Image (cartoon, rainbow, N blue to C red):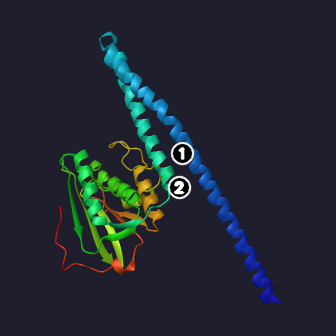
Amino acid sequence: HDATDRKEYEQLLEERVAERTSQLLAKNQELEGFTYSVSHDLRSPLRAIVSKAQITLEDEGPNVSAEGKENLERLSAAAKKMAELVDDLLQYARLGTRELRLETVDLAELARAVAADVAGERPGSEFVVRTECDTRVECDPRLVGMALHNLLDNAGKYSLPGERARAEFVCEERDGERVFCVRDAGIGFDMAYVGKLFKPFERLHREEFAGTGIGLANVKRAIERHGGRVWAESDGPGTGARFYFTLKGPQRAWLSRRASLPEERK
């Protein structure tokens, strides 16, 4: 009798958990849909503001007072910043609903391509790809490429004042698991605040550096969509940062190639 009651109770509990989980997923999808709709609808008005402000400055420049020019420039800058935030929010919403298009990708090659793009955007930056394991993975290259771009771009953005931005992408094996890492020589952070890094709108260096606070949240969402995990470490301010992530992929690819791989690739 007790065994029957226990079984019925466990079944009821499972049904309640399944129901609550379904409700939570529905609410999350509703919220993501709302975020996408609002962000999408904001893009056109913001672009119109930027465009009108620039046209006014170009066409009416001689007739606009110094104070008027300053106000128009501030208006344009504020609208551009808001447009950047809207674009990041759109990307964040899409990451939750976009269908994964998996293919076999050499992550080292993808990292080199992304590093070349970021170096072009940030002249003087130095990015190195160093691998100690097989870097072939099953992933959506657009999503993982976006994550790598955000991590490498952060390395360029948060470099030490007056120093050349330097970072490297590495792959290593830990307890039979491939771990990928982007490590930089930048400003680093206090580990007491590490929990804030991957949350939307949370920024540790709000005053010193520009940004929307969505980049690392997008990285986390992209990696977790692949069943992976992401975390960050630093030895403290001024010591650089290390951003690690894993991706679930074919077990056969987890064989070390230390003997055959070059020591360093640029």
Residue labelled with disc 2? 97
Identify residue type, mark 1. Tyr
* Residue 171, x across and y down, in percent: 29, 70
Element class at badge 2: helix
Element class at badge 1: helix
In the figure, residue 190 lies in which quadrant? bottom left
Query: CA gap, disc 1 to disc 2?
Result: 10 Å
* Residue 29, x across and y down, in percent: 60, 54
Residue labelled with disc 1? 36
In the figure, residue 58 lies in which quadrant? top left
Identify residue type, mark 2. Thr
Depth order, front residue of 230/162 = 230
**Residue 32 relative to residue 155: left or right:** right
Give the residue drawn at x 18%, y 80%.
Answer: 259
| Local crowd size for mark 1, using a 10 Å CA cut-off: few (<14), some (14–19), many (≥20) | some
**Residue 85 relative to residue 243: left or right:** right
Depth order, front residue of 202/147 = 147
First reached walking from the N terminus: tag 1 or tag 2: 1
Give the residue drawn at x 36%, y 80%.
Answer: 252
In the figure, residue 62 lies in which quadrant? top left
Circle 1/circle 2 CB separation < 8 Å = yes
* Residue 260, x across and y down, in percent: 18, 78
Give the residue drawn at x 41%, y 62%.
Answer: 140
Give the residue drawn at x 27%, y 79%.
Answer: 256
Position of residue 145 relative to residue 207, above or below, is: below
Position of residue 80 relative to residue 248, above or below, is: above
Q: Residue lying farthest top?
A: 63
* Residue 115, x across and y down, in percent: 25, 55
